[in-house]
């Protein structure tokens, strides 16, 4: 088995392997790799005699490339015989590992939607409340600018942090079908009017000073943007839910007293459902089609990731499981208010779109993130962005 090296997740997977080996004649071994090394290693190994039997993946375009090369085993027949495993997971999370109608992976990590975090003390001092609509949101931007507070922390030295705005604007304007068309075929789907409008809204937000003047020099990895929020120098921060444990670790007093959260606002006239989410529905385990131990690999997968022991370990690690009814398990546990709210958002979301840079091929993702940085810095128009991506994909 191959998986990412992750301080929170690796002990969960390792414990599942130990339990499986104790109760089975088959013996599994786990190898873990850091992120970039894993991406290169799995690309080379898949389809070769060195491919792992069970492998970690991000679903979406990342998984589709292996499916299209006939390197992944479909799980539909197995799940038909074990409906309790298939039905254990939230449907909108399972969808990210479904390619051309077939299921090729099962969720093996917690779910991580993107939401707005905010500083309650800064909001209280300004006499304002979290917004529900985009016009209300824009009024907040003006309010905080007038008070010399950066409205939104943005670690813009990394394009993936800007991608979240494009994802939500397109969802709220055109619904999840617009990006689904891009992920499926690219090309002209990038030039859809809703895409151009969403990109223009990103650029307009930057132009009006919503992110301050030095966002291009701020980095997420050194907690620069997180600190701006925690110290009250910024009022809001759009980020994945992994930001919550970051704040608990780095700014515990702020996290316990003044850290709030709210969903991305609705856009008047848009067709996207208010409860739609973007982010990381989950990560997945899949089985290599060329595995010499295919039956054992499928047996491990279908007997572990939906089990009570695995879900309990995920919760202990601080994750929010993508299984139905997990809210009952989260109650009374540490950080129950935040984790239960996240679970409620995910379990009731009409759609949960995977982050675009994980849903398209690595080459397209690289160009996408580069163009986003140019867009936010007013170095590329929304139409030029769309035209360039149509040519790239």
Image: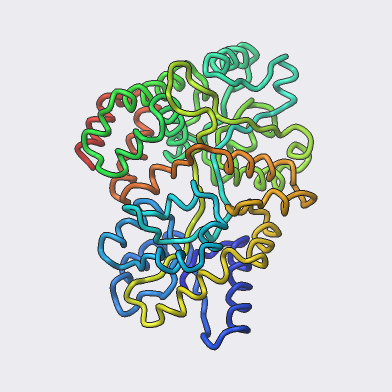
Task: Give the percent coordinates (x, y) of residue 301.
Answer: 50, 70
Classify 143 as above or below 379: above
In the picture as drawn, the residue positioned furthest to the left comes out as 391
At x 63% / y 84%, what residue is drawn? Answer: 22
Relative to 243, 58 lies left or right: left
Q: Quadrant of the C terminus?
A: top left
Relative to 116, 45 lies left or right: left
Q: How is the image coloured?
A: rainbow
At x 54% / y 24%, what residue is drawn? Answer: 265
Residue 118 in view here: yes
Classify 188 as above or below 34: above
At x 58% / y 52%, what residue is drawn? Answer: 322
Q: Nearer the viewer, residue 119 or 133?
A: 133
Q: Nearer the viewer, residue 306 or 137?
A: 306
Task: Give the percent coordinates (x, y) of residue 213.
Answer: 50, 23
In the picture as drawn, the residue positioned furthest to the bottom comes out as 25
Task: Give the percent coordinates (x, y) of residue 376.
Answer: 40, 27
Residue 381 in view here: no
Q: Nearer the viewer, residue 161 or 198?
A: 198
At x 52% / y 74%, what residue is drawn? Answer: 300
Classify 43 as above or below 171: below
| Res 44 → quadrant | bottom left
| Res 391 → quadrant | top left
Q: How many discs mark residues in the rendered view?
A: 0
Task: Give the percent coordinates (x, y) of residue 303.
Answer: 56, 71
Q: Nearer the viewer, residue 368 or 224?
A: 368
| Res 354 → quadrant | top left
């Amino acid at each position: 088995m191959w998986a990412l090296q992750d301080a929170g997740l690796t002990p969960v997977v390792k414990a599942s392997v130990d339990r499986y080996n104790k109760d089975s004649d088959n013996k599994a071994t786990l190898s873990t790799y850091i992120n970039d090394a894993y991406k290169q290693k799995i690309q080379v190994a898949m389809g070769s005699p060195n491919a792992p039997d069970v492998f970690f993946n991000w679903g979406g375009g990342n998984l589709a490339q292996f499916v299209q090369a006939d390197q992944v085993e479909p799980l539909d027949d197995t799940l038909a015989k074990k409906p309790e495993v298939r039905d254990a997971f939230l449907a909108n999370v399972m969808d990210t590992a479904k390619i051309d109608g077939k299921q090729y992976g099962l969720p093996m990590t917690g779910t991580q939607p993107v939401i707005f975090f905010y500083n309650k003390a800064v909001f209280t001092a300004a006499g304002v409340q979290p917004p529900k609509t985009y016009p209300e949101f824009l009024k907040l931007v003006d309010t905080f600018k007038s008070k010399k507070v950066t409205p939104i922390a943005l670690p813009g030295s990394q394009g993936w942090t800007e991608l979240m705005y494009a994802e939500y604007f397109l969802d709220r304007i055109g619904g999840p079908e617009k990006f689904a068309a891009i992920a499926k075929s690219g090309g002209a789907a990038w030039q859809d009017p809703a895409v151009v409008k969403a990109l223009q809204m990103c650029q307009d937000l930057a132009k009006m000073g919503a992110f301050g003047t030095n966002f291009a020099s701020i980095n997420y990895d050194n907690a620069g943007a997180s600190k701006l929020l925690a110290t009250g120098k910024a009022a809001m921060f759009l980020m994945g839910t992994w930001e919550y444990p970051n704040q608990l670790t780095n700014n515990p007093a702020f996290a316990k007293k003044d850290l709030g959260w709210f969903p991305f606002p609705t856009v008047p006239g848009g067709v996207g459902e208010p409860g739609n989410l973007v982010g990381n529905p989950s990560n997945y385990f899949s089985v290599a089609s060329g595995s010499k131990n295919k039956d054992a690999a499928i047996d491990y997968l279908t007997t572990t990731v939906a089990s009570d022991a695995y879900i309990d370990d995920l919760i202990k690690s601080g994750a929010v499981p993508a299984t139905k009814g997990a809210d009952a398990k989260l109650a009374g546990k540490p950080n129950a208010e935040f984790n239960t709210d996240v679970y409620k958002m995910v379990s009731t979301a009409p759609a949960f779109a995977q982050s675009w840079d994980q849903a398209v091929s690595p080459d397209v993702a690289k160009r996408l993130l580069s163009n986003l940085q140019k867009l936010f810095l007013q170095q590329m128009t929304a139409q030029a962005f769309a035209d360039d991506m149509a040519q790239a994909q």
